[in-house]
Image (tube, grey):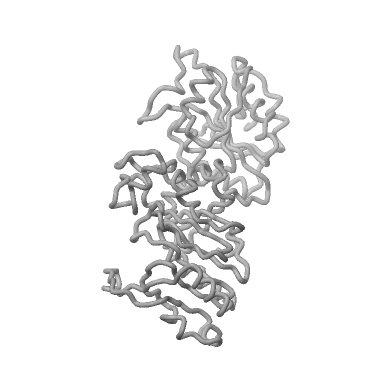
Amino acid sequence: MFAELGIRAGERIALVGAGGKTCLARRLIEEARARGWTAVFTTTTRILPPEGLRLVVGMEALHENTLRESGALCVTACWLPEWDDTAAGRQQKLGGFSREQVDRLADFLKPDLLVVEADGSRHLPLKAPAAHEPQIPPSTTLVLVLAGLSSLGRPLDARTVHRPERVAALTGTLLGTRIDPALIAGVLGHPEGGRKGVPPGARAVAVLTQADVRRRPAGREVARRLLGRRAFPRVLLTDLDDPALPVEVWPRLSTGGKVHAVVLAAGGSERMGQNKLLLPLAGKPLVAHAVDAALGSQADRVWVVLGARAPEVRAALADRPVRFLHNPSWPEGLSSSIRRALDGPPGHGAAVLFLAGDMPFVPPDHLDRLIGRYCASGAPAVWSRTEGIRGIPALFDARLFPALRALRGDVGGRALLG
């Protein structure tokens, strides 16, 4: 994860939040050791003894060669009278140093990497800091703010969240509310939540853990929300239990340009006599299903082209991190919405992935397969097909933008797929 986090020799990292701080610390130290670096793990709170590291209790037990002899150390202040039941059995906890003591420890040992666990979460996937938290050392250069995606879909209560009352207060929600991407982004991005206590000059990165294949689409929505409110310059999605699953970085570090997802939602639904995009389905407007699929995909940006009843459609999507384009020529047909998208920022990217606003059952992984096929093949167009019929969602490379702009009437990109 060093490349994704931009870690340099001499980095002093503080881990805060919930959802795997100790596991992430172990991953970082393992990578440091693989590079031949020296590494120190310590805490300003309470931790269990970590596996695979030489443990030193008390700074008085250290000498100048201790770190050089071991390569990696866990250094804590004392043993505590507290015990914790874990999968490995009943274990005694270790007490941490003050913030200033950690800085003195780092100055004395001069490790290539210092990792500090700077608050507690009682092994729960989500938290908000108390008044005395976090305890981040002043010399910290990088703060990693964690949240576990296993909290998604569960109620906001003490069984899932550490200090649920504080989370509710910061996000303006009620206890018992179902946790969704907006709530996670709300607590992580709040100045008194995940952003609390970051020292001046330190970089801050949000790390969404437990981001397995099933939870990754929702994690992408959390990332888009955090980036949209400029709470963090970078967000990582990772599954610490599955090292084979690649770490995903947002904003996307694509080398071939951006892939924009465009949801076409300008039509007037004249045959129905009402705008079908606003009809409810499974608790949300029809158009929201297509938009949420795009938000859960690997597309770099998500846009919605509006036309008929634009204010109502925009209002139905107001809480989602999307950008809007208005098509005043929507009565001319589908091609006018395609041209409107290409006349805007999507037309300056590497490719555009078009979705229909009235297709609610397209999952994010289908869109990812289209993007993946495009990136792997370099084909000018990648489309969906069912029962021998080609259509959208379909992705078009910039090479086809001139042909798409030449379309007229109520036709879309299917006219080019033959």
Q: Is residue 243 visible?
A: yes
- Residues 247 and 74: in front is 74
- Residues 120 and 156: in front is 120
Position of 396 compared to 117: left or right?
right
Position of 383 compared to 288: left or right?
right
Residue 56: image location, x then y, percent? 43, 82
Q: Quadrant of the N terminus?
A: bottom right
Position of 273 compared to 227: left or right?
left
Residue 163: image location, x then y, percent? 34, 52
Which quadrant holds residue 276? top left
Query: What is the number of callouts on the image?
Result: 0
Q: Is residue 391 visible?
A: no
Residue 18: image location, x then y, percent? 41, 57
Residue at position x 41%, y 71% from top? 96
Residue at position x 46%, y 62% from top? 135
Residue at position x 51%, y 53% from top? 206
Q: Quadrant of the C terminus?
A: top right
Position of 82 compared to 139: left or right?
left
Q: Is residue 28 above or below residue 369?
A: below
- Residues 410 and 155: in front is 155
Which quadrant holds residue 178? top left
Residue 254: image location, x then y, percent? 64, 50
